[in-house]
Image (spheres, coloured by chain):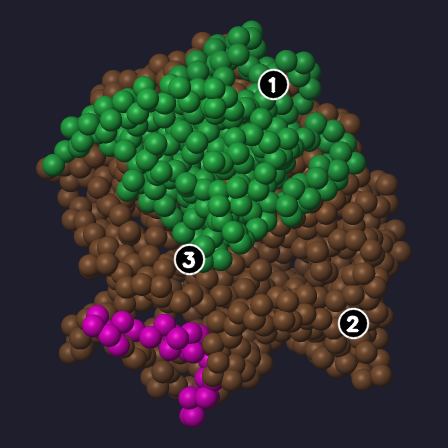
Amino acid sequence: MAEAHPVGFQWVMEAKKRGATVIHVDPRFTRTSAVADEFVPLRVGSDIAFLGGVINYILSNELDFREYVVAYTNAATLVTEGFQDTEDLGGLFSGYHPETGTYDPASWQYEGHEEFAQTHEDTHVHRETAAGFQHEAHGPPVSGFVARDETLQDPRCVYQILKRHYARYTPEVVERVCGVPPEQFRKVCEAWTRNSGRERTTALVYSVGWTQHTVGVQYIRAGAIIQLLLGNMGRPGGGIMALRGHASIQGSTDIPTLFNLLPGYLPMPHFKQHETFDMWAEAIRHLGQKGFWAYARCYAVSLLKAYFGEHATEENDWGYGWLPRLTGDHGTYQQVLNMIDGKIKGYFLLGQNPAVGSAHGRAQRLGMANLDWLVVRDLYMIESATFWKDSPEIETGEIVTEECRTEVFFLPAASHVEKEGTFTQTQRMLQWREKALDPPQDCRSELWFFYHLGRLVRERLATSTLERDEPIKKLAWSYPISGQHNEPDAEAVLKEINGYDVATGAPLSGFTQLQADGSTACGCWIYSGVFADGVNQAARRKPGKEQSWVAPEWGWVWPANRRILYNRASADPQGAPWSAKKAYVWWDPEKGEWTGHDVPDFEKTKDPAFRPAPGTIGVHGLAGDDAFIMQGDGKGWLYAPAGLIDGPMPTHYEPAESPLRNPLYAQQANPVRKVYDRPENQLNPAPPERHSEVFPYVFTTSRLTEHHTAGGMSRQLAYLSELQPAMFVEVSPALAEERGLEHLGWAHVVTGRAAVEARVLVTARLRPLRLDGRVIHQIWLPYHWGGSGLVTGDSANDLFGITLDPNVLIQESKVGTCDIQPGRRPTGRALLDYIADYLRRAGLDASHYAPLETPGAGE
Amino acid sequence: MNSLFGPIDPAKDAGYTDAPPRMGFFTDTSVCIGCKACEVACKEWNAVPDDGFDLLGMSYDNTGGLSANSWRHVAFIEQAAPSPAAMDVLREAEATVSTQFLGMPSSTLPGTEGREGRDLRWLMMSNVCKHCTHAGCLDVCPTGSLFRTEYGTVVVQEDICNGCGYCVAACPYGVIDRREDDGRAWKCTLCYDRIGEGMTPACAQACPTQSIQYGELDELRERAAQRVEVLHQRGVTEAKLYGHDPDDGVGGDGAFFLLLDEPEVYGLPPDPVVTTRDLPSMWKHAGVAALGMAAAAVVAFLGRRP
Ligand code: SF4
Ligand code: SF4
């Protein structure tokens, strides 16, 4: 955190000054470890074993916050009789279909609700379309009415299932899998549990590298299970905080730049699953479910009204037919492979430098070199704009400038200080930015670019009679513009996002005002309220000392300016604060309403003792203690009966590339991971496949404080470039000795995809781990370098192949296997021969790819 | 004539009649996270040029030391036993690059002795001009380019500096340095242009963890003493102050530090003494110095491109 988020880390230092204990778990000793009280090195890719060990510690010592757990989580809920655990099936859950490599999750359901389950074909579609994303604000479909055993004794209740699942994750297993000594592991468990409960809460903070694994979603799930067991959700000082890699990454999923989502986590329609508007709206609503998604139709109609204005009418299903449809996987990696195959002709690239920043850089560059046209909007001429003349593939002859068919249009972009708008940070807080100065020369904002692009395309198509042009022609596309360059008004866009009454244009005060009859328009239902009373609420900057400690008048937080989600859980089931110290939101019996420091995340007048009549759905179906109001059953999920493609509970699988056989299960890696078996995407062999010793070391990558991601914003600046002027690789003294590497000398790291050269830093901050009597060396590389800028170097991301998490299609780009050798890498054609030789020795060729299901699993 | 030794108020001593309180820095290295925001902010505010793109191999320190083009310098000290080869390079790099390395003959890097078997420590420390109570650089400056401000800080005026370089040799910390292009001397001004406006110096403003604290020196000294006490109570017995003592060889520093190891470990002189302490007895050499100064001025003119 100190490395990549030094500004946020000031609060950790502040807490430390006040006596907090800081524990840092990381494969390598970083600037964070330097100031931590305890540094816990572990093997890259072993985090679920570590967290599973913590869960086991909590459950076997009964250290869970029992009252919270029984009332607010699904611990008491019973699961079908048919459910079988990985513990019984060699690392697979029940329902595995080897032909498709997917699960049929019927047996994972709550008892009596098997019919809620999707089939494994549905699951296949969900994997292709990364459907897991929809659950960010949205419980996946489950029934609200479930069988429960509040004594937690029934062997089929979630609590007991969880206990059995993690029973094997003992401190000894943690040591074998992660390389963490039991005494040190115990310290972590003790600190975490001691600092949780009525009087205290613990926050779990992670940075997004945590998600970049084939089990990335399950990493976060494992953290969530611990936080729920310890009562750390919905309470001040608790929660799970994702530190995003860029400003407004939260914003770019809320109002998404993803292929599979529409604003507010509404799913992008799928051509088969959502043929009609009703099918789509009902799919969002999840029939039979409790909670606020019951109003999904209002959100959906209002969005279409914002898109198509007067053209969206009840008769034409609000223009639903004009929305594009998903037909399968259109994720960024599939697209790159499609480019290589010539299936994609044109591409827009904004705020992204995939030639350096994405996994398998070579595939990225080869794909972009096979387009008709490419539009790059960036601050500088980044590698993704110049690959046709100076990429590593020019050197190897794989791209020939004269023959490269891609026409590249580079459009200089305005920086964040040169345009207005909002950033949404990890707490879901929108903060308005003013423009500090005009962008230089031809640099323009994204808003300017897209508004005018849309305007010009619409002018071109004005007389078109083709049906395919209708969606563009029918768009509501009028925004006030001003100034020399006709800059659209960013606040007008924010007003549209907030929503307004169609007849009067009056801004709405929140999403509860949205209607399904076309009388309201709203660009993103969860952001409704950001322009309440016609005031830009995101621009509020009332100093902290002039308001309460929750600071509700600083910026604006979705939904409804609620600073902590699910804050009903900050009070006990009867509505009283868990403790005076942690009082946040509580029930005032005299007034008969919820009150407190924050906006209560609950219906204001719903009595804690309220119990709905059986069968009541929607908001009225929520009981007075159903704190997790967006979940279909109102409970926090220790066990996920639906919505996850790779299982209801996190399970330790090895990374797709690993030098180790999975010490826990016959199943080696995630059995439903998303793979692309193609000749250009050879993955290094992992046991039980043969020849894994050709790539004997584990490597990982991350950021340095001095640079920003793919370097587009830092390698161009002298003051930053001088601070970290060269690509380097960190190795332990022991590995340096083993491979003959010299401090400050050259070395190169080799995988089945690439060889990357770097200067060597020999440092004790990296240390070999002893696992199962075997020494595992870990190598670390920063990923900031590329071919352009003031300081240049090879790109670490070239080393990775493409394997993805099945839930959200995030790539496994934080762990792989490699070799390292002293000296510089070969150049030109010789480089290709060099890698081919490694592939040959590792037995990799296009005729065989590792199977998803490891032989012996499932037994 | 200014005092040359002992605890004094430097602004008063320099003739300011009702000077504002003496301002300075307390740099608490125990909370430094090595982000180098201080280095960058200083360069941005003061338009200091870059210092070259060289990988030094001194842990994450690629600045190397304070110089004419780096007025803040974040040192990174890895304390464990690295491979012998790495130790050689580290020592070599420190000796050649850092203007401050003291070159003590020793078979190990300072700070690594006796640490075998102890956990790895990674010390970070943002170094800066000490704005000494008795500033050698100022005492020897023949042009008056270096002067004492009303805040008790020491500032060099680039439009008066003639590049003679006396100050460089006179600084007991090796801080002030000449630029290669025009030979003039540069160093931290304690953001004279900012503090005069009531603003915080750029480096302190940028520091996210309040490792760099700016304020009235008296108050900072109190705060620092408390901080040491807290750290000692928490078992960080190695915490100690450096440069805070008005009775030391430079009359105390305007910029002083909390360190977690011996000063040498950070490349700081353990017992700095103002180089002009014996100046009175050296006055007889002044004539020679004046001659030298004239020669330096001629060289500076010749060296300047049209
Ligand atoms: S006080 Fe000003 S001049 Fe001195 S180091 Fe800090 S930023 Fe640079
Ligand atoms: S800005 Fe502060 S925390 Fe960062 S390196 Fe400088 S002194 Fe240390």
Figure quadrant of the C terminus of chain B: top left
The residue wearing badge 2 is A586
Regarding residue A721, the answer to whether it shows in the image is no
The residue wearing badge 1 is B111
* Horizontal side of residue A331 vs A61, given as left or right: left
Q: Which residues are magenta?
A: A482-507
Could you say which is closer to the camera, residue A664 or residue B22?
B22
Badges 2 and 1, same chain: no
Mark 3 or mark 2, whichever is nearer to me: 2
Please report the residue visible at 40 percent of the width from the left and 59 percent of the height from the top: A257
Badges 1 and 3, same chain: no
The chain painted green is B
Could you say which is closer to the camera, residue B263 or residue A277?
B263
Callout 2: residue from which chain? A
Asked if labels 3 and 1 touch by Cβ distance under 8 angstroms, the answer is no
Mark 2 or mark 1, whichever is nearer to me: 1
Q: Quadrant of residue B296?
A: top left
Q: Is residue A232 magenta?
A: no
The residue wearing badge 3 is A258
Few, some or many residues within 10 Å of mark 1 (<14, 14–19, 20+): some
- Mark 1 CB near ligand 2 (8 Å cut): no
Asked if labels 1 and 2 touch by Cβ distance under 8 angstroms, the answer is no
Few, some or many residues within 10 Å of mark 2 (<14, 14–19, 20+): many
Provide the secondary structure element on which disc 1 rests: loop
Q: Quadrant of residue A403?
A: top left
Callout 3: residue from which chain? A
Mark 1 or mark 3, whichever is nearer to me: 1
Hue of chain A? brown
Callout 1: residue from which chain? B
* Rendered location of residue B179, percent (x, y): 30, 31
